[in-house]
Image: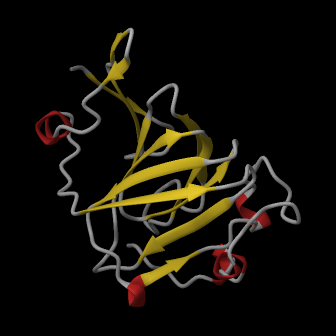
Amino acid sequence: MQLNVLPLPIADVKLITTSRLTDARGYFCEAYVRSDFVAQGLDCDFVQDNESRSDRAGTVRGLHFQKPPFAQAKLVRVLRGKILDVVVDLRCSSPSFGRHLAVELGESGGEQLFVPAGFAHGFCTLEPDTVVLYKVDATYSPTHDHGINWADPALAIRWPVAPEAATVSDKDRKLPMLGDLSPVFD
């Protein structure tokens, strides 16, 4: 199988596609082969897979991250439906600190987004009954779980849903704005 890794405008975030073998039954792909990823410079030891299902289009999850020493790199893919996937650079020493990047991911394209540690991550579903799967390289730690508010106007993210129309958890609605966040990643 062929692994295609496309660098994106924010350093270290990558859009990844794998070749698919298609026939009358559908398709087959090797979504993750560690040695192929390592050969492309993506050397993460993924230790946990997370899956979410969102019933409605306009569901927003995020923007989440874990603080060190449980900071997580993520490999995100959509199994059903489509999302606008968003990352925000929280690395204080990065020239793109506070900037975001948004990419559409869907089941039909089979793209994956590699998000290194040091970023907040979230998404908005563009279709009902969307299922997202993501690998992480550190286990979930409730005491290190944190985030920034998805609707922070300073981030200037063009979400496909208005804040009053979005389906959002109470936890995510109460996340702080980026300007209220103490530095997390050097």
Horizontally, residue 165 falls left or right of residue 110, namely: right
Horizontally, residue 79 falls left or right of residue 152, namely: left
Most extreme residue toward the left is 35
Tell me if residue 164 comes above or below residue 11 in the rendering.
below
Estimate the x, y position of residue 146 in percent, counting from the top left.
Answer: 51, 80
Q: Quadrant of residue 166?
A: bottom right
Tell me if residue 102 comes above or below residue 96 in the rendering.
above
Say which residue appears at 39% left-offset and 9% top-offset. 24
Horizontally, residue 13 falls left or right of residue 148, namely: left
Q: Quadrant of residue 163?
A: bottom right
Say which residue appears at 52% left-offset and 26% top-offset. 108
Q: Is residue 99 visible?
A: yes
- In the rendered image, the quadrant that contains the C terminus is bottom left
Give the colour scheme of this rendering. secondary structure
Say which residue appears at 15% left-offset and 41% top-offset. 38
Say which residue appears at 21% left-offset and 20% top-offset. 1
Q: Is residue 74 visible?
A: no
Q: Quadrant of residue 142?
A: bottom left
Tell me if residue 137 comes above or below residue 69 in the rendering.
above
